Image (cartoon, rainbow, N blue to C red):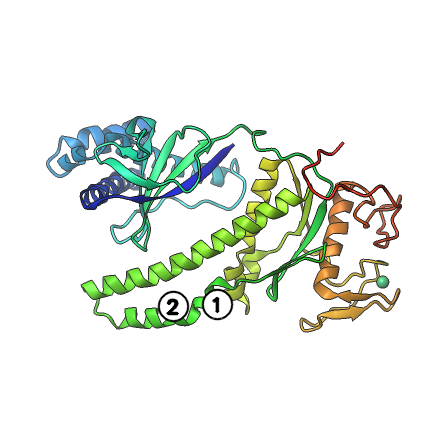
Amino acid sequence: MKLRYNYRLYPDIAQQQMLAKTFGCARVVWNDALGARKAARKAGLPFIGDAAIQRLVLTQAKRTPERAWLGEVSSVVLQQSVRDLNTAYKNFFDSVSGRRRGRKMGLPVFKSRHDHRQSARFTSNAFRLTGAGSLYLAKIGEVEVRWSRELPVAPSSVTVVKDAAGRYFASFVIEVPDDGQVLPGCYAEVGIDLGLAYYAILSTGEKIANPKWLRRREKKLARLQRSLSRKRKESANRDKARVMVARQHAKVADARRDFLHQTTTSIIRENQAVHIEDLAVRGLARGRLAKSVNDASWGAFAALLAGKAARRGRTLTKVERWFPSSRLCPCCGWKNGKLALEVRAWDCPSCGEHHDRDLAAAINILLEGQRITGTTVAAGLAGHGINDCGGQVRPGKATPSPAPPETCDARAA
Ligand SMILES: [Zn+2]
């Protein structure tokens, strides 16, 4: 499986200029290739194949005075740019023909010199990790890297990125063996209810506060945004103001990413099976709570859980979005009418149990997940079991079993 590792880069001034040139050339080659294919299509000519397009926008173009400067940067990067475009086309064709699952892919688009995120990809013959701890890039030299964590194996390519906040990153794609990161088995199992009042409530009763990254910086961002809008177009001050806004957004994104990684890592580490709701995030993100929903990044949370579960040998179950997790009594299965959003707790009219709304939802998600998978990690051990007919049994009334090990360190039998 492929994993991505990102590190901050600190190129010096000369290297920054050379990188700017490299980004520019990679962009021009991409645009030339895309333009040639679009023109061919317009003229009713056949699609220009991968080898032909490379000859056209690289080999032949370099011989013309208009494109001679392409020779100043690493040819590997330019070839890669054409290859990336070919991949984008392939994804589009596969998406149209139904060979590619997931979201519909659009046609590749032109890149602009005004894009605030620029990148270039170096494949193995154009970069090297030096013994001195820096990163050697073809035609650019040795660039200082902050190695925030160890690279597990030698990378096959590196993408150098300059983001809108003016920061440089090296992004490595690493091929790791599929079972290389499997954790020892453990007994714990958890249901997760995602929300806005709390970020997540676990069926264990643990509540994870909502950091509201964007909301917390909203005032400052609004002030910077106003300052930006007052600056004259194309002025140096406007550029400075734009970077200030981008830096604030980068801080929000960094804090959010750290939180999502830490939270999902600890959930996967501590539980053998994780059950969550399959939220229609795209739909929710259009409604009245759009800003908060986007800020919460539930989609990214679920995607990280899924990736880590697969990598670490854990199971992740998604409960259908129509499952009424917040309306069922986890003890007796009684189904409530719709609860108003402000109702935080309720008493079951059938069995009389008092429920914290979110905790009950998390437990329901756990039970439904167990029903879907038809098993429990250690049936009854956690106190929530499934009876013979697949119905839910009252927590605490499941068949008593030996106590589970306290931690995940112990290997499951
Ligand atoms: Zn009940």
Q: Nearer the viewer, residue 314 or 25?
A: 314
Location of residue 228 with respect to 180 vertically, above or below? below
First-in-chain label (1 vs 2)? 1
The numbered disc on residue 215 is 1
Q: Which mark is residue 50?
A: none
Q: Nearer the viewer, residue 39 or 327?
A: 327
Question: What residue is pinned by disc 2?
Answer: 221
Q: Residue at x 33, y 63 (%)?
A: 245
In the image: residue 40, left or right of residue 179: left
Q: Quadrant of the C terminus?
A: top right
Visible residue check, residue 208: yes
Q: Position of residue 9 (x, y in %)?
A: 32, 43
Residue drawn at 55 percent across, 66 percent down: 287
Please state the horizontal and vertical placement of residue 325, each as a whole percent of the image: 73, 58
Task: Return the x and y of residue 347 as percentages of the image width and height.
Answer: 82, 69
Place of residue 192 in the rendered image (x, y in percent of width and height, measured from the top left): 67, 54
